[in-house]
Image: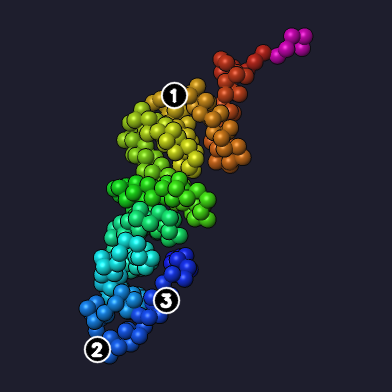
Amino acid sequence: MTPNPMRAAGRRVRFVAAAGWLSLAAAACMGGFQVRRFPTSGALYAASLAEFNKGKWDNAVTGFEKLTLDLGARDTLLPVASWYLATAHERKGEHILAATTYSRLAESFPDDTLAPVALLASANSYLSLWRRPDLDPQYGTLAQLQFRQLRNVYPDSPLAASADSGLQRISEMFAQKDYDVGLYYVRRNAFDSAILMFKDVVKDYPNTDHARLALMRMVEVYRRPQMNYKEEAAETCNTLRTAFAGNAEVASLCAVHADSGATAAGKPDGKVPPAPAGR
């Protein structure tokens, strides 16, 4: 749900907008949307907002972009116009323009109530461009930076939890990206390379579910006849049991090793132990 910038901005634009409706009514009779027809910033703001509310994104972009160029740096209408400009870009599917406009708003007006909202919107716009882990992650990295900035600069914001959720989602995607590379190496029988990739997932993204999956795949690779690293498999199972106690998949995977270990201890030579003396 898109936050309401008018609520965030308070009452600062109401007088300007109200005055602008008078000029808007006159301009409407002339037909079409042309910014030069609105003699004041208030009139252009009211007209642009009307276009925005009607879903005419091209007109809204044209109007709000003109306002962001004409309004003075101290004009309280500027951050609101920037918000609507960015949001109109987003509604048009112009995610990069939206993200950069949101980010510029937050950088230019860090004390404005719209700043944390804009950072969150910027991060989400970037993240919408990274649809799958196997694609170029540059937009995921940019989204991550925006989420972190929101978390660090506005730690008490009610949006901080949304930033944490976004960061976790990105971590999962990065973890899956490396995890999938590890699976590729397994399919190619490049087991040493697979182990290195899985270890990186565990080290770099320890709080993701793919860390658990990577550890499980490590156990399976260690047990392969080509590797037969029994001690490493046992140590990894111990790590899994500690970190993911109660997980059914972990219990099932590591029970195999526990059973085989017990058998090896009870029958070191593969023979039936002799009966106790005296019988």
Name the foreground residue: 246 vs 152.
152
Q: Secondary structure at mark 1?
A: loop
Cα gap from disc 3 to disc 1, whole angstroms: 77 Å
> On the image, which quarter does residue 29 sit in?
bottom left
SS type, badge 2:
loop
The label shown at residue 30 is: 2
Q: Earlier in the sequence, mark 3 or mark 1?
A: 3
- Say above or below: 171 vs 110: above
Cα gap from disc 2 to disc 3, whole angstroms: 24 Å
Which residue occupies 57% across, 24% down? 261
Which of the 4 image quadrants contains residue 61?
A: bottom left
- Residue 33 lies, with reference to residue 273, above or below; the image says below
| Quadrant of the image occupied by residue 265 | top right
* Residue at the image point whose x is 39% and y is 40% from the top: 179
Say left or right for 161 vs 111.
Answer: right
Q: Secondary structure at mark 3?
A: helix
Q: Amino acid at mark 3?
A: Phe
The residue singled out by tag 1 in the image is 228
Image marks 2 and 1: residues in contact by CB distance under 8 Å: no
Earlier-in-chain disc, 2 versus 3: 3
Dot 2 amino acid type? Met
Magenta highlight range: 275-279
Q: Residues within 10 Å of mark 2 (few under 14, many from 20)?
A: few
The quarter of the picture where the C terminus appears is top right
Residue 265 among those drawn in magenta: no
Q: Residue furthest right?
A: 278
Question: Mainly helix, strand or loop, the magenta region?
Answer: loop
Query: Where is 228 relative to 70, above or below?
Result: above
| Whole-percent x, y for residue 33 in the image | 25, 81
Give the amino acid at mark 1: Asn
The percent position of residue 103, horizontal first and vertical second, equals 34, 55
| Residue 15: assigned label | 3
